[in-house]
Image (spheres, rainbow, N blue to C red):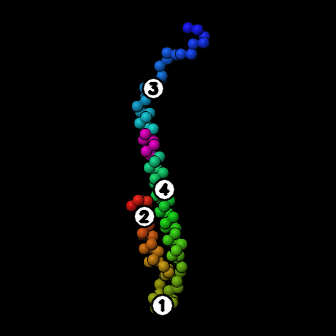
């Protein structure tokens, strides 16, 4: 063999844990994909709730305006609760 010969007869290195490594990469990829999906659905739900709370703010109404006395009443509480109940956690459901 001369010094200018660039061909090699070396075989590629094989690791004894090649199957386990690809399995770990697959499981890790699945966990990352599920995490990104979870974050996206929570972000979607949070934005929906935030929009409904802004649409129907919790304004304190004095209980002394009516015959009924008791703790402070909130305006738009039923409307806000109904609107927030319509918000979905998952994008496609």
The numbered mark, 2 or 4, whose residue comes first in the sequence reads 4
The numbered mark, 1 or 2, whose residue comes first in the sequence reads 1
Dot 4 and dot 3 residues touching (CB under 8 Å) = no
Task: Identify the residue at horizontal 42%, vertical 41% (top origin).
Answer: 27
Circle 4 residues within 10 Å: few <14, some 14–19, many ≥20: some
Disc ID at residue 88: 2
Task: Report x, y in % for residue 23.
Answer: 41, 36
Q: Say which element carries label 1.
A: loop
Disc ID at residue 66: 1
- Spatial CA distance of label 1 from label 2 is 36 Å
Query: Which residue has dot 3 on it?
Result: 15
Foreground: disc 3 or disc 1: 3
In the image, the segment drawn in magenta is: 26-31
Circle 2 residues within 10 Å: few <14, some 14–19, many ≥20: some
Q: Nearer the viewer, residue 88 or 20?
A: 88
- Spatial CA distance of label 3 from label 1 is 80 Å
């Amino acid at each position: 063999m001369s010094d200018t010969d660039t061909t090699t007869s070396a075989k590629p290195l094989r690791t004894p844990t090649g199957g386990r490594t690809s399995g770990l990469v697959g499981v890790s990829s699945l966990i990352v994909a599920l995490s990104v999906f979870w974050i996206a659905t929570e972000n979607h739900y949070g934005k929906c709730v935030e929009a409904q709370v802004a649409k129907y703010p919790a304004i304190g109404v004095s209980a002394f305006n009516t015959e009924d006395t008791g703790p402070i009443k909130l305006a738009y509480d039923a409307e806000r609760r109904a609107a927030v109940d319509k918000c979905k956690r998952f994008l496609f459901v």
